[in-house]
Image (tube, rainbow, N blue to C red):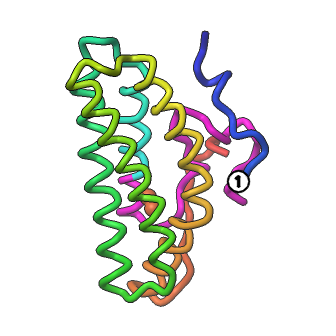
Amino acid sequence: MNPTDTHRLPGGARDPYAPVDDELGSVLWSDARLLGFGPMDETHQDFYRVAFDLLRADEAELPAAIAAVEAHAIDHFGQERRWMEETRFPSTDCHVEEHDAVLASLREVREGIAQGRLGSAVARSLAEHLFHWFPGHADHMDSALAAWMTQQRHGGAPVVLRRRGST
Ligand SMILES: [Fe+2]
Ligand SMILES: [Fe+2]
């Protein structure tokens, strides 16, 4: 089964720039997900890459795959937290709370795999959850931070440049 056919958000929040519902919950990166702040957009593409590797990992690949997702998340969320703190971003708390909930799940699953209690079914379920979680988080939390950071650095609104045919 093609996983891109089965992982859609059930009508939840969507990126206003996203052209079609097909992009929601996709397990593949789309430029429709660009937020216009380059360093964050690069990190978000990495998120899709490591989460997809976890989704596809077999039992032998699982420990490395879950460790890679957790390491990515620590860097990703830490970077966003530093940006918020350094620039005194006004609504940091709920953003950080969402990050912390994801980190707790990743740590729990990583430890369960290391101890042999959890296997690929749980890891796959976690990866699916990540792909469902990310669009709403990006639209409601990261997009505000991206606009804020662009304003801080350049004094203007973010500019989203997408490749032709990507929308
Ligand atoms: Fe993010
Ligand atoms: Fe975030």
Q: Height in image: 101 above or below 97? A: above
Residue at label 1? 14
Query: Ligand 1 falls in which quarter?
Result: bottom left
Residue 37 part of the magenta segment? yes
**Magenta part of the protein: which range?**
15-43
Residue at (51, 65) in percent of width and height: 142
User: Where residue 74 sits: x, y (%)?
Assistant: 27, 54
User: With 146 as the anchor, is 33 left or right in this view?
Assistant: right
Report the residue at 29% width, 42% height from top. Answer: 107
Q: Residue at x 50, y 27 (%)?
A: 125
| Residue 123 placement (x, y as % from top left) | 40, 26
Give me the residue at 29% from left, 28% from top.
Answer: 112
Q: Quadrant of residue 17?
A: bottom right
In the rendered view, does 12 fall on the left or right side of 41? right
**Amino acid of disc 1:** Arg
Quadrant of the image containing the C terminus: top right
